[in-house]
Image (cartoon, rainbow, N blue to C red):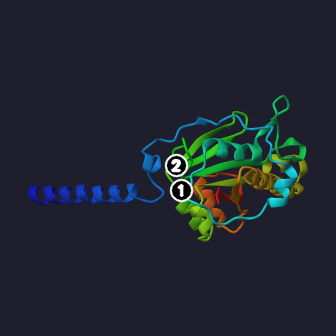
Amino acid sequence: MGAMLSSLFVIVFFAGLVVAAEVGSGEGGGSGGESGENPVKKELPEPDRDGTFALEKALDERRSRRSFSGEPLSLSQAGQLLWAAQGISDERRGYRTAPSAGATFPLDVYLVAGDVDELAPAIYKYEPSEHAVTPVVPGDQRSDLRTAALGQDSVGAAPAAIVITGTYARTTQRYGERGEMYTHMEAGHAGQNIYLQATALGLGTVAIGAFVDDSVSSLLRLSGDEKPLYIYPVGHQ
């Protein structure tokens, strides 16, 4: 009986090692990607509020881009895009770069970073009041996001993707059911800001609305009333 128990212990022990190895080797796993860095909350470089690229030129040149070079994004480029989407443009009143119905601000913005200089691969949540990003899920999650986006190659090929989410209750508590439509309108405002800012930075992006909602929500660890609305892969051409 003692020999049988010892053998059983060895089998269970090695089975546990195999399972642990398989979990730790997943594409979306890890704690910071190939660099070995652990994702931490990081302040972003101060956004440029007085650029020289003309708005009219950005409007004229804005196009959807679905292919990207292998060049990483800089931290300042990532921060500038996040600021354009939902950054603070009026410190005293807390107003943001995109208009919001009743200043209810139902949107949140996430950065799915795979190849961004000075930033460990991870999913980060943008904190507008601090102009900083806070890690939500460690590791390079671009492959899983691509799968959730029905296998669209641009999502996996871009060095990073911006995901816009909406929490309807922030706006419906003031405007009733119509607040849901206002949230969708606001996502469009923020998305156009991303397009124009990417163009001004010499980058490309594309608005993606085709994805499995539950899969994106699970990947970003969303809860409650928060829903994914848009994915914007972004990178160099």
Q: Say whether marks 2 and 1 touch (CB < 8 Å).
A: yes
Residue 99 vertical placement versus 68 (above, below): above
Q: CA distance from mark 2 to mark 1?
A: 8 Å
- Mark 2 residue element: loop
Q: Nearer the viewer, residue 192 or 223?
A: 192
In which quadrant will I find the N terminus? Answer: bottom left
Kindly report which numbered mark, 2 or 1, lies closer to the viewer in this rendering: 2
**Residue occupying image coordinates x 51% and y 44%:** 120
Place residue 227 in its image quadrant.
bottom right
**Residue occupying image coordinates x 53% and y 62%:** 143
Q: How many marks?
A: 2
Q: Which residue is mark 1?
A: 141
Q: Nearer the viewer, residue 18 or 28?
A: 28
Residue type (three-letter) at the residue carrying disc 2: Pro
Q: Which residue is mark 2?
A: 121
In which quadrant will I find the C terminus? Answer: bottom right
Residue type (three-letter) at the residue carrying disc 1: Gln
Residue 38 vertical placement versus 196 (above, below): above
